[in-house]
Amino acid sequence: MSIGDVLGWSDLKVCTQVAVVGCGYWGKHYVRISSEQPRLVCKYACDFFPDNLDSIGKKYPSVIRTTKLEDILNDKEVEVVFVIVPARLHFEVVQKCLEARKHVLVEKPYTTVTADCEALTKLGCSVGRQICVGHTYLYNSYVRWLWTTLVDKKSLGKIHTLYARRTNFGPVRQDVDAMWDLAPHDISVFQYIIGDMPISVSAIGQNIVSDNGLSDVVFMTLKYPNGVIAHVHVSWLDPHKVRNLVIVGSDGRAVMDEMNQEEPIKVYNKGYRPRDEEKEPARGGVIFRDGDIMAPAVPAKEPLTEQVLDFMGGVQQGKSPLCTAEFATDVVRILEAASQSILQEGAPVRF
């Protein structure tokens, strides 16, 4: 099932001209996607590095290449700008795009300061332009399946804990630490599944190889209402690339392992219930149930394409994208609190 099917639309109806600002590793994919979609025209590719623009020019010669953001801002034919620049530049670039009355899709994190997120959201509303933040895991086929098939239908019962591990051996970034780089993916999924802000967050981090004092390894714990606990482990220094998500409920458990190409999702039909002391005299206060293990076949779709289609469909129909500016601001608020906790050697920060 595509994101268009889930949100009630499938094909773009109007041809829209777009621009991509930042044409590095991820930016080039936005150029590709907007060039491949029949109702999108990638008019500009903007980057400060000539090598990135040369690479774009070889594959997409019809795309105008520029090092000046003003070329895009002054072109009234461009309605949408994809912003894929370092996080520290998000506020400045998005602000200029909104002031030029462009719709904006900006990569995560929204910004690195909650107040800046709120200011951009207010600006977007005042000029009547949409903002979507690139939390691509909300468009991941496996995450969508977990939500629509298990969580939304309460097949796992009452959810108690969630935990995620996102590790690899490099690359080390210079603009944000490992938590701000990697954890937004999992925090956004937690927020989507639980549907509420945590009541507190605690985190510890370790700086090993970064020469700017940023944490290379972080362990974070979030406490949500109703006793739900979530945990995230992120690292640039692990020997293996791991992309795991585990959801534990009273009636079942679900595991997503993106590195397992054959069985990326497993659902364990294992649960428990309180023991009836009169009918079931035994030790312990609960009865455990052990059932089947299911590995569903879930067709994979490119999350980035699904995200672009969701945003563009929303722009054309005047609907909000799946990942709104308000949703993304909550993720930044959690990250800011976790950063504060790291400075306080793991002391919980309450919301």
Image: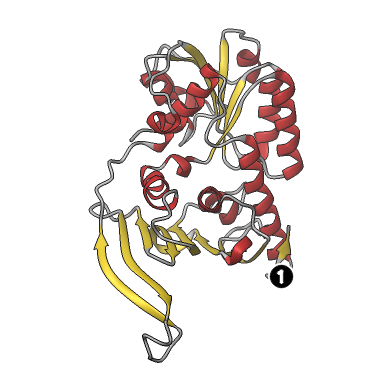
Q: Where's residue 114, x and y in %?
A: 72, 44
Q: Quadrant of the C terminus?
A: bottom right
- Give the colour scheme of this rendering: secondary structure
**Would residue 27 be found to the left or right of residue 271 on screen?**
right
Q: Residue at x 74, y 30 (%)?
A: 122
Q: Where's residue 246, x and y in %?
A: 42, 61
Quadrant in which residue 111 is drawn: top right
**Would residue 5 be found to the left or right of residue 115 on screen?**
left
Query: How many residues crowd around disc 1 within 10 Å: few (fewer than 14), some, or many (20 or more)?
Result: some
Amino acid type, label 1:
Ala
Q: Residue at x 42, y 17 (%)?
A: 12
Q: Is residue 40 above or below residue 340?
A: above
Residue 45 visible? The answer is: no
Residue placed under numbered mark 1 in the picture: 347
Q: Residue at x 38, y 90 (%)?
A: 281
Quadrant in which residue 129 is drawn: top right
Q: Nearer the viewer, residue 140 or 36?
A: 140
Q: Where's residue 128, x and y in %?
A: 68, 19
